[in-house]
Image (spheres, helix red, strand yellow):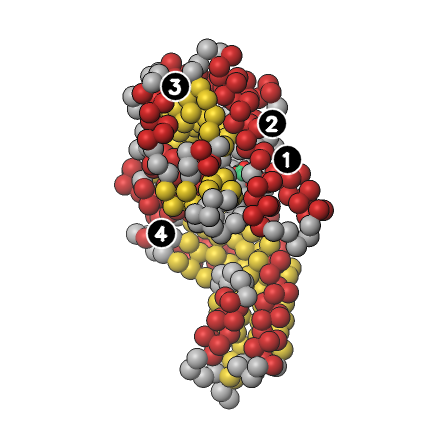
Amino acid sequence: MPVLVMKFGGTSVANLDRIKRAAKRVGVEVAKGYDVIVIVSAMSGKTNELVGWVNETSPLYDAREYDAIVSSGENVTAGLMALTLQEMDVPARSWQGWQVPVKTTSAHSAARIEEIPTDNIMGKFGEGMKVAVVAGFQGLSPEGRITTLGRGGSDTTAVAFAAAFEAERCDIYTDVDGVYTTDPRITDKARKLDKIAFEEMLELASLGAKVLQTRSVELAMRYKVKLRVLSSFEEQSDTAGTLVCAEEEIMESNVVSGIAYSRDEAKMTLISVADRPGIAAAIFGPLSDAGVNVDMIIQNIAEDGRTDMTFSCPTDQVKRAEKAMEDAKSAGDINYHDLIADTDVAKISAVGIGMRSQSGVAAKMFKTLSDEGVNIKVIATSEIKISVLVDRKYMELAVQALHDAFELEKAV
Ligand code: ASP
Ligand code: MG
């Protein structure tokens, strides 16, 4: 029997009625002849509640106990989903991560999946079981402790199972009906994409389009798992939602596929650092050691052997970045006149695999922003992405203008 993986996010299993609704969808696929692996999240809000309890009990908690507690939300939904399916006369049972076992590293609260043996579940399929309901987000460390994969990690569980079981597809049921050209809350011209390439999705996911955990997309790309994002609240056809797939499967697409934004980006400028070999390493080494995720970097023109260095990082890492720079300065590794943090900026990015073969995208983006009177503070580009930092008050305007300029409301 072909295997299908179906993942239901927190809002899709938020209460018993919704679990029933999700179970009915599973029943439809079973009737089509699939053996189904269902991956469930915790009921929406549950994980946050559990995290809250941990913090209240022990602010400097033991990470192993954090995982033991925070993983438990998924156990409840896995059991309830299996029971609901049984009530529908669909042969089903639940598995917690350790029972499969989902073998992970021991990096608690950010563990990586290393291996998923298939014999256990396949054996049960062979005996006539139709649905394996697996608790997402959790695994087992080499030390025999429960681990979790990081927030949003059940997407990664789903893709990892799809890869391990060579599933025909991995369907991610969520509260939106697919991946959009931009956030529909910012412009009602946002259009649902039928298909998007893994690489584009990776850029959009890491840029803050919170539909899929970034790591799940990385995994899907590596193992060529066909990933579909769709709503559990709407009637579905076989072509519903957005298919995240290999570039080769997309015949035609707009040059730009989507406009992403991130509100939580800060611009940091080191004023007057020595312009000498090794200065970038002396700055960005300590930042990386301090766990600061630097995104864009600009080194300005040097004058009299001094230069300004600008970089961007998430707003909540500004304090850490400042401390890392002060420490490096006290240690005599770098010398700068001042460190200026501008936290009133937003990052806007145009993403599209079409940029590989078409030029002029950057020029069009800059012209569009200039026509709107939006000043660009920092620019960074990659093969399929152009990002700019602008004042946060222009964020919506910039996204709308770019969405119009690249005619994203129209499919090709
Ligand atoms: N329940 C976990 C979370 O809220 C994992 C997930 O839903 O993907 O982060
Ligand atoms: Mg999620």
Q: Circle 2 — which element? A: loop
Q: Which residue is mark 3?
A: 130
Q: Which residue is mark 1?
A: 45
Q: On the rendered image, what quadrant is the C terminus found in? A: top left
Please tell me which residue is depicted at 50% across the width and 21% down the height of the picture: 82
Please identify, in this view, whether the residue under mark 4 or under mark 2 is nearer the observer: 2
Q: Circle 3 — which element? A: loop
Q: Earlier in the sequence, mark 4 or mark 2?
A: 2
Quarter occupied by residue 77: top right
Q: Circle 1 — which element? A: loop
- Gap between marks 1 and 2 measured at Cα: 8 Å
Q: Circle 4 — which element? A: helix
In the foreground, 209 or 389 = 209
The answer to whether the residues at label 3 and label 4 have Cβ atoms under 8 Å apart is no
Q: Earlier in the sequence, mark 3 or mark 1?
A: 1
| Residue lying farthest to the bottom in this orientation | 304
* Amino acid, disc 4: Met
Please identify, in this view, whether the residue under mark 2 or under mark 3 is nearer the observer: 3
In the foreground, 405 or 68 = 68
Q: Earlier in the sequence, mark 2 or mark 3?
A: 2
Q: Which residue is mark 4?
A: 355
Please tell me which residue is depicted at 60% across the width and 76% down the height of the picture: 327
Query: In the rendered image, is residue 82 in sight?
Result: yes
Q: In the picture shown, does residue 307 fall above or below 386?
A: below
User: Residue 267: image x %, image y %?
Assistant: 58, 64
User: Residue 387: image x %, image y %?
Assistant: 48, 57
Quarter occupied by residue 187: top right
* Amino acid, disc 2: Ala
* Amino acid, disc 3: Lys
In the foreground, 407 or 177 = 177
